[in-house]
Image: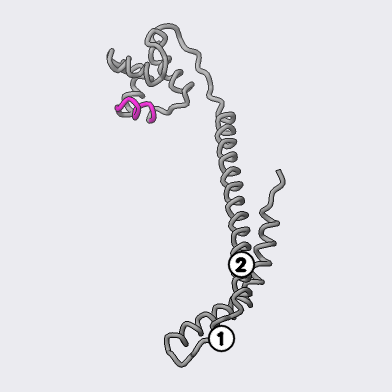
Amino acid sequence: MLNENIKAIRKSKGLSQQELAVKLNIVRQTVSKWEQGLSVPDSDMLISLSEVLETPVSTMLGETVIETEVDNLKAISEKLEVINLQLAQRKNTRRKIIHWSLILLCTIIIVVFATILALESPYLAWNYSDPETAVLGVAFHSFEWLFVRVAPIIFIGAIIGIFFTWKKE
């Protein structure tokens, strides 16, 4: 009777013999022997077994327990639902980060353009006979030249990206 109850309760909890053995810190063969009726757990082990299986010792020693099948399909679907919810939250968070990053990029491009227009390239009036000034002037001019040609393309791409990541709620 004890052997049948151990097996039925273990299966109803969805545990394999190996998993139960690990929780009890014993070898799988011991659980197998209990379930076959070849041996019985001692009193301390019986108490540990009842704690792991969340079943009173009296129930394990008493009447025959009817084995309840674990609804594997339901358990799997619940786990998948949780995983899908987590993935959806990650996707939504990633979309928001990309959306606000693109808005920040557009803002930075507008600010840099406004700064370039306001300064009106003051480095063009510098004295380029000094080598340090010449290097700095060339660096500013190179940045401005490249920025004015590349930034509009990046800006348009960012605007398109903003519309694609914009979600109506």
For the point 61% across and 79% down, the residue is 120
- Badge 2 crowding class, 10 Å Cα cut-off, few under 14, some 14 to 19, many 20 or more, is some
Toward the bottom, the furthest residue is 129
Query: Residue at the location (61% across, 46% down)?
Result: 92
Q: Quadrant of residue 150?
A: bottom right
Quadrant of residue 43 within the rendered picture: top left
Left or right for 98, reference 53: right
Where does residue 75 sit, x and y in percent of width and height? 55, 30
User: What kind of residue is marked 1?
Assistant: Leu
Is residue 12 placed above or below 126 in the rendered structure? above
Residue at x-position 52% and y-position 18%: 68
Few, some or many residues within 10 Å of mark 1 (<14, 14–19, 20+): few
Q: In the rendering, which numbered label is found on residue 64? A: none
**Tag 1 residue:** 124
Q: Secondary structure at mark 2?
A: helix
- The residue lying toward the viewer, choosing from 50 and 92, is 92
Q: Secondary structure at mark 1?
A: helix
Residue underneath mark 2? 109
Closer to us: 100 or 29 = 100
Q: Is the residue 92 above or below the residue 109 in the image?
A: above
Res. 160 image quadrant: bottom right
Q: Nearer the viewer, mark 2 or mark 1?
A: 1
Sequence-first tag of 2 and 1: 2
Magenta-span inclusion, residue 75: no
Specify the segment rendered in magenta. Answer: 19-26
Quadrant where the image shows the C terminus: top right
Q: Position of residue 48 (x, y in %)?
A: 32, 18
Asked if residue 25 is among those painted magenta in the image, a careful observer would answer yes
Q: Amino acid at mark 2?
A: Ile
* Quarter of the image that includes the N terminus: top left
**Where residue 109 appears, x then y in whole percent?**
61, 67
